[in-house]
Image: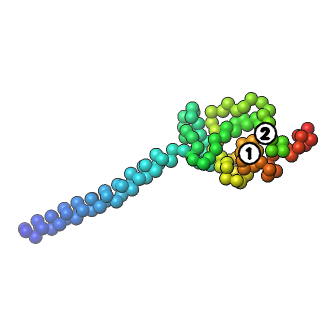
């Protein structure tokens, strides 16, 4: 009988210790993950965002530029950007990786002197190279 009581106490201690270890290791990782998700409330490169339309993140992550491409009514001639209609009044924007020194053709967008002059000026990325070509 005493042997059974000792075994029961050992089992209770082992289960209690196991539960404590689980809570201290795995529960704290879940909290970190939850905090990480909350901190990750920004749109990545090539993702859409909107401050007024539901279902989108509110802003771009740090280091990305907010661009409203629909419709993008600008075109560039020899690194000068011209407006050819009303500016975009879209409520949905796109986050672009502008300012890294690379005028890139991303799967979601193409950088150019109008949406990213700091990366694309002087790199032959204008829509037209001269007024003559435009005309």
How far across and how far down the image is residue 36, in percent? 46, 50
- How are the residues colored? rainbow
Local crowd size for mark 2, using a 10 Å CA cut-off: few (<14), some (14–19), many (≥20):
some
Q: Quadrant of residue 27?
A: bottom left
How far across and how far down the image is residue 65, in percent? 64, 44
Q: CA distance from mark 1 to mark 2?
A: 9 Å
How far across and how far down the image is residue 50, in percent? 59, 36
Q: Is 132 left, or right, of 111 in this rendering? A: right
Is residue 116 visible from the viewing direction of this image? yes
Q: Quadrant of residue 72?
A: top right
- Most distant residue in the top direction: 86
Pointers 1 and 2 in contact (C-beta within 8 Å): yes
Q: Is 99 left, or right, of 132 in this rendering? A: left
* Residue at the (78%, 39%) spot, across then down: 81
Q: Quadrant of the N terminus?
A: bottom left
Circle 1 sits in a helix, a strand or a loop, which is it?
A: helix
How far across and how far down the image is residue 129, in percent? 86, 46
Circle 2 sits in a helix, a strand or a loop, which is it?
A: strand
| Relative vertical location of residue 77 with respect to residue 28 in this rendering, above or below | above
Q: 132 or 41: nearer the eye?
A: 132
In the rendered structure, which disc, 1 or 2, sits on the residue that comes first in sequence? 2
- Residue at numbered disc 2: 81
* Residue at the (64%, 38%) spot, across then down: 93
* Residue at the (57%, 40%) spot, across then down: 59
- Most distant residue in the bottom direction: 3
| Relative vertical location of residue 39 with respect to residue 7 in this rendering, above or below | above
Q: 81 or 19: nearer the eye?
A: 81
Q: Quadrant of the C terminus?
A: top right
- Residue at numbered disc 1: 117
Q: 7 or 52: nearer the eye?
A: 52
Local crowd size for mark 1, using a 10 Å CA cut-off: few (<14), some (14–19), many (≥20):
many
């Amino acid at each position: 009988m005493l042997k059974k009581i000792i075994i029961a106490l050992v089992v209770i201690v082992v289960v209690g210790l196991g539960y404590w270890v689980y809570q201290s290791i795995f529960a704290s990782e879940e909290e970190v993950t939850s905090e990480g998700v909350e901190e990750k409330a920004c749109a990545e490169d090539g993702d859409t965002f909107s401050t007024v339309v539901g279902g989108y993140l509110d802003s771009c992550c740090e280091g990305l530029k907010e661009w409203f491409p629909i419709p993008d009514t600008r075109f560039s001639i020899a690194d000068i950007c011209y407006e050819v209609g009303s500016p975009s009044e879209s409520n949905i924007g796109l986050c672009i990786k502008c300012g890294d020194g690379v005028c890139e053709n991303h799967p979601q967008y193409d950088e150019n002197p109008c949406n990213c002059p700091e990366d694309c000026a002087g790199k032959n990325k204008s829509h037209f190279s001269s007024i003559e070509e435009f005309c």
